[in-house]
Image (spheres, rainbow, N blue to C red):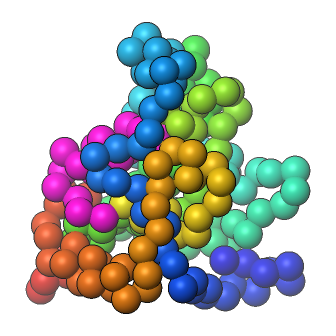
Amino acid sequence: MADDYGEIEFYGSRQRALFPIEGIRVSRSMAKVIRRGDFEITFDQDFRGVIAGCADRPEGSWINHEIRRAFAEVHELGWAHSCEAWREGELAGGVYGVALGGFFGAESMFHRQTNASKAALHALIQECRRQGFLVFDAQIMNPHLASLGAFEVSTRRFDQMLAQALRVKTRWGLDLSE
C-alpha cells in the first residue's frame, strides 16, 4: 500500500481475514437484492473503473497512481480480476484482487449505490468457488467484513492454507506449479 508520502510499502498482520469460500453472510434484505437481480454482475469488464472507484474516497486512499498502474498491468497479464455491479448501464460498485492458483486475494471494494459492493463480493466469491479456489483472502479484519462473515486465522495457519491453495489450478489463477 502507499503511505502518506506516496511510497509503496508491504504490510503484514498477525491475523489474516478470510471469507468462507462457501460465500458471504447474506442478510434477508441483501438476499432480496440478489434474487431480484438489482445489479447486473460482470467480471473483468471494467477493471480500471473498479480500481478507480476503490481509490476515489473522500478520506483518501492507499491506492495511488503507481498501484493503479501496476494492478492494471497485472490484470492485462491475466491474473488480477474484477467483479462489477452495474445499474442502468452505470458502474455502481465492484471489487478487485489477484488470483494465484486456488488463492484469491481481494484488494479493495467500493460502492456508489447501496448494496452494490456486497452484490459484487457475493458474486466474486461464488465465481471463485465455481472455479475451485480454496482461499478467499480479505487481508485485515474490520467490523464490516466481520458482518459479512469474514473470520481470522493466524499467520501460521494462513501460510499452510496458502501453500495448499497455490498447488491448485484454476481458470483465473496464475499457474505456479511450473
User: Which residue sits at x=46%, y=61%?
Assistant: 151
Image quadrant in which you'd find residue 63: bottom right
Left/right of residue 114 with respect to residue 128 in the rendered view: right
When the figure is inspected, residue 83 is found, relative to residue 115, above or below; the finding is below
Magenta residues, dominant SS class: helix
User: Which residue sits at x=77%, y=51%?
Assistant: 56
When the figure is inspected, residue 87 is found, relative to residue 162, above or below; the finding is above
Residue 175: x percent and y percent?
19, 74
User: Which residue sits at x=48%, y=74%?
Assistant: 16
Left/right of residue 49 with respect to residue 150 in the rendered view: right
Image quadrant in which you'd find residue 171: bottom left
Residue 169 can be seen in this image:
yes
Left/right of residue 39 with respect to residue 92 in the rendered view: left
Residue 94 can be seen in this image:
no
Residue 90: x percent and y percent?
61, 24
Residue 2: x percent and y percent?
73, 78
Image quadrant in which you'd find residue 11: bottom right
Read off the magenta span: 120-135
Left/right of residue 5 with respect to residue 40 in the rendered view: right
As for residue 44 lying within the magenta part, the answer is no
Along the line of sight, the residue nearer the viewer: 89 or 151 = 151
Residue 170: x percent and y percent?
17, 60
As for residue 121 lying within the magenta part, the answer is yes
| Residue that sits furthest to the top in the current view | 36
When the figure is inspected, residue 68 is found, relative to residue 58, above or below; the finding is below
User: Which residue sits at x=53%, y=37%?
Assistant: 118
